[in-house]
């Protein structure tokens, strides 16, 4: 299969070469430097645009000078062009250049003067590609000519502090703990499938990509490292643009998708639909557990997993008039996952003599997903940047599972069959009102209120099979029925000021949570409680130069446990390793301090960060030995966690075609139990390094290589093993970059990869190892067509609920794996 994919790719590549060789033009190279006409000093970070002299409205190339005012670019087509150089406060330079095939033109020093005419003021509206604000960094996608042919995922590779590897995994500042917003609104659609969704979005539908590094009071205290906000175009004309894509891999997985954006009069529509099949080949698993008496329990076997699913979204907007906008949106994500396990288990006493042994076969299925419906109204005012929005959202998140386990005696054990089912669902209503207004030129005030009604419900049951009567007998427990309601009321206010090189932002968010849990079968276990939190945040920044910035920040974050953590369903699919959620969990609270330095030049993007995080009631997974050979795992608020460390990101472009990047972080973690009856603790260093190299060849051909290593991660009772990976990707575009074919491979020299966990308490020591297939080859094809003469107007501020702590270890949470 993988050989066939490679043959197809290079056959297409050879065809493209033969079609393009006849009109080959040697590469044209141009360089120069922008300097002040009076002081002769360089003008850093100047925006450079190259336009066609015959059609000045067409931008051929856009870039920014480095810290010394120097620039360099290449073109593949000769002709007459105009170089436009622009910098705030200075007159725009328009320099004609006549380029011929093979030219290596040095323009020398290009002088810029102070602007002093009305015409120069009008022309200076050209925006820089990268803009640094108090709490975010903005990349102007609409000013980059590459956005006309690339998709959004490709454009993310150019954005400071964002990394996209050959497997299309997105990272922010070297971390996967972030949120992706679309026009200020998060959705499960993008969060669960960022690569597939963003690859299907043409970049010419996007205005800016914002990296929000210090989320303020207006955002839920979600506890993430940052936010990537994709801002779509809002100018109203008409037309449409669409794309289709497909992919497959050597493991039997595949995906199909389509994207459409259309505008007609005052109505606009944007939609995306994808379906996928994910398949994981059979993998091996081994576990070893030794208790204080010296007895040993071993388990080894195989498991397989597959999932089918689909996801999509749509947004319909209506422009009531120039100041009022109404939009309706929906997204749907869901599927069904199935897994099958076969294990051989045995117990040995302290003399290594066999006590018993048996075979265990298990089957499980899981329905997962979410559905969201949103209605947003936006009112703009004559006063610039004054904005009022009102929003409502309904979210439904089912999570149902069925399990069956069959145990067959080998030696000294009893045959048994058990089955269990859980029907869980979260229903959420959210109402939100936001208002922001500028005061004078340097001050901004914002405020808002929000109300969330979150309803969790679980109905579960367990049966065992009676071999004598040949019938299933139910086992009834008090937590078979569980209802959990959260009412979350919040209000926030924020203040921003920026004067010359100094910026300050502060905010305060008030959140009150009313929680009520009921057990209809046994009401004695009912409980209710409430939490009130004041959540402050503050950021102070200082701009050393237009390309350098220091930022000092503090924020508090909270996370409420989701249904997977709270659900009291007793999972006995593996009778020797029982799992159950904990409905008594409280909200996590963390305090975060960071000092950040950023440097952005034409060739180098650098961001380094010193941080300290304190979490006083961390939710930790806890395992205890409840019988001589049975462990019980649940979650508890018993972790006191301290993290101190540094992260380092650098993106270096030594030439226009070569890109080298690295993400590195190292931290010291200390976790201790705050339970007086439990003295568990753990500490140690955690590090990770990821990097890659990308090169663009002639004829729209590119290649990249990526690799990385992460050291073992630390938890309260042990650690999870580290991992390493390598990947390679080849891409070729055809038909004026409308058709793109890509082939990639991950861990091509690694047949199997090992992941594992170790746990140690006063009662036992355990070690689990899982061996998964490593090699995977993929092929992907996408085609873009249509033209948007202008884009759809959308609401600027929408609902974002990110406070809910997601699940761990639940096949439903991870069931939406990429189709390829």
Image (cartoon, grey):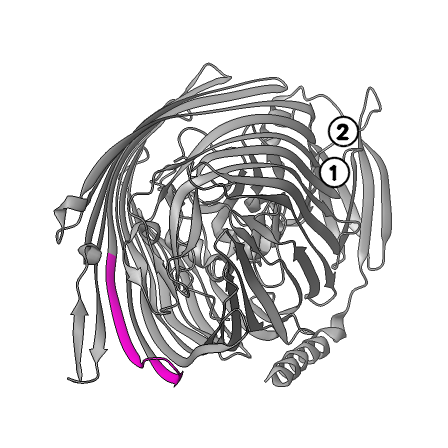
Q: Is residue 408 magenta?
A: yes
Q: Is residue 722 above or below residue 246?
A: above
Tell me the element at label 1: loop
Q: Is residue 416 above or below residue 37?
A: below
Q: Picture coordinates of residue 61 (x, y %)?
A: 68, 49
Residue closest to the far top: 440
Q: Picture coordinates of residue 607 (x, y %)?
A: 67, 38
Q: Quadrant of residue 595?
A: top right
Q: Is residue 622 above or below residue 642?
A: below
From this viewpoint, is residue 582 visible? yes
Q: Quadrant of residue 314?
A: bottom left
**Which SS does the magenta portion mostly show?**
strand
Q: Nearer the viewer, residue 288 or 391?
A: 288
Q: Residue drawn 13% across and 51% down?
A: 520
Q: Nearer the viewer, residue 746 or 35?
A: 746
- The region drawn magenta spans 407-424
Disc 1 marks which residue? 65
Q: Is residue 662 magenta?
A: no
For label 2, the crowd category at 10 Å Cα-Cα, with few meaning under 14, some 14 to 19 and many 20 or more, is: many
Q: Is residue 622 found left or right of 488 in the rendered image?
A: right
Q: Residue drawn 76% across and 37% down?
A: 66
Q: Quadrant of the N terminus?
A: bottom right
Q: Nearer the viewer, residue 620 or 766?
A: 766
Q: Picture coordinates of residue 788 (x, y %)?
A: 45, 55
Residue at mark 2 to residue at mark 1: CA–CA distance:
8 Å
From this viewpoint, is residue 449 visible? no
- Checking the image for residue 43, the label placed there is 2
Q: Quadrant of residue 168?
A: bottom right
């Amino acid at each position: 299969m993988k050989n066939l994919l490679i043959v197809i790719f290079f056959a297409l590549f050879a065809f493209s070469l033969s079609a393009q060789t006849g009109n080959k033009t040697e590469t044209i190279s141009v360089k120069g430097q922008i300097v002040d006409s009076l002081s002769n000093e360089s003008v850093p970070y100047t925006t450079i645009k190259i336009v066609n002299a015959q059609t000045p409205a067409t931008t051929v190339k856009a870039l920014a000078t480095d810290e010394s005012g120097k620039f360099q670019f290449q073109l593949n087509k000769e002709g007459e062009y105009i170089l436009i150089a622009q910098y705030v406060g200075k007159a725009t330079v328009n320099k004609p250049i006549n380029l011929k095939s093979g030219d290596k033109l040095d323009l020398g020093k290009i002088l810029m003067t102070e602007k002093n005419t009305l015409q120069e003021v009008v022309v200076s509206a050209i925006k820089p590609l990268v803009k640094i604000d108090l709490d975010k960094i903005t990349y102007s996608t609409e000013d980059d000519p590459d956005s006309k042919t690339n998709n959004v995922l490709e454009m993310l590779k150019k954005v400071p502090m964002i990394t996209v590897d050959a497997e299309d995994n997105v990272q922010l500042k070297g971390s996967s703990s972030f949120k992706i917003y679309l026009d200020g609104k998060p959705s499960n659609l993008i969060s669960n499938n960022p690569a597939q969704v963003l690859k299907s979005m043409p970049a010419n539908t996007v205005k800016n990509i914002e990296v929000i590094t210090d989320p303020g009071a207006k955002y839920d205290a979600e506890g993430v490292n940052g936010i990537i906000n994709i801002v779509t175009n809002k100018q109203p004309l008409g037309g449409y643009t669409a794309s289709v894509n497909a992919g497959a891999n050597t493991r039997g997985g595949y995906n199909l998708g389509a994207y459409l954006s259309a505008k007609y009069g005052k109505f606009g529509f944007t939609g995306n639909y994808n379906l996928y099949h994910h398949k994981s080949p059979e993998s091996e698993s081994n576990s070893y557990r030794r208790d204080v008496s010296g007895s040993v329990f071993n388990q080894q076997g195989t498991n397989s997993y597959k999932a089918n699913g689909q996801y999509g979204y749509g947004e319909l907007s209506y422009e009531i008039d120039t100041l009022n906008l109404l939009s309706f949106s929906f997204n749907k994500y869901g599927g069904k996952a199935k897994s099958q396990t076969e294990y051989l288990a045995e117990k040995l006493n302290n003399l290594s003599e066999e006590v018993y042994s048996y075979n265990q076969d298990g089957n499980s299925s899981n329905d997962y997903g979410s559905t969201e419906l949103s209605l947003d109204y936006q009112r703009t005012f004559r006063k610039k940047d004054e904005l009022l929005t009102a929003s409502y959202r309904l979210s439904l998140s089912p999570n149902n599972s069925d399990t069956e386990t069959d145990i067959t005696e080998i030696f000294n054990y009893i045959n048994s069959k058990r089955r269990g089912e859980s029907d869980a669902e979260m229903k959420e209503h959210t109402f939100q009102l936001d208002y922001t207004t500028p005061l004078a030129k340097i001050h901004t005030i914002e405020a808002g209120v929000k109300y969330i009604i979150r309803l969790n419900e679980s109905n579960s049951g367990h049966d065992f099979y009676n071999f004598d009567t040949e019938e299933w007998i139910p086992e009834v427990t008090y937590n078979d029925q569980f209802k959990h309601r959260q009412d979350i009321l919040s209000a926030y206010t924020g203040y921003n000021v920026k004067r010359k090189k100094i910026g300050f932002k502060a905010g305060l968010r008030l959140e009150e949570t009313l929680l009520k849990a009921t057990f209809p079968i046994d009401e004695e276990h009912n409980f209710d409680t409430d939490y009130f939190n004041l959540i402050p945040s503050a950021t102070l920044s200082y701009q050393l130069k237009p390309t350098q910035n220091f930022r000092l920040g503090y924020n508090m974050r909270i996370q409420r446990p989701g249904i997977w953590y709270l659900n009291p369903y007793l999972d006995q699919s593996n009778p020797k390793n029982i799992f159950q959620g904990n409905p008594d969990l409280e909200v996590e609270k963390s305090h975060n301090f960071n000092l950040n330095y950023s440097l952005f030049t034409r060739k180098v993007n650098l961001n380094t960060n010193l941080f300290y995080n304190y979490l006083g009631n961390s939710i930790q997974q806890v395992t205890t030995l409840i019988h001589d050979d049975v462990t019980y795992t649940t979650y508890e608020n018993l972790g006191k966690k301290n993290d101190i460390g540094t992260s380092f990101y650098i993106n270096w472009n030594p030439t226009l075609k070569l890109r080298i990047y690295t993400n590195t972080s190292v931290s010291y973690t200390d976790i201790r139990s705050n339970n007086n009856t439990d003295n568990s603790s753990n500490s140690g260093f955690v590090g990770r390094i990821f990097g890659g190299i990308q090169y663009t060849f002639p004829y729209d051909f590119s290649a990249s290589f990526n690799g990385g290593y992460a050291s073992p991660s630390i938890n309260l009772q042990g650690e999870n093993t580290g991992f390493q990976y390598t990947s390679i990707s080849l891409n070729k575009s055809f038909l004026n970059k409308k058709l793109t074919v890509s082939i990639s491979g991950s861990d091509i020299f690694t047949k199997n990869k090992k992941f594992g966990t170790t746990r140690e308490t006063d009662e036992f020591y355990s070690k689990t190892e899982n061996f998964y297939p490593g090699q995977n080859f993929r092929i992907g094809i996408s085609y873009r067509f249509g033209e948007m003469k202008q884009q759809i107007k959308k609401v600027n501020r929408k609902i974002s609920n990110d406070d809910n702590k997601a699940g761990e270890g639940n096949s439903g949470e991870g069931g939406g794996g990429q189709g390829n």
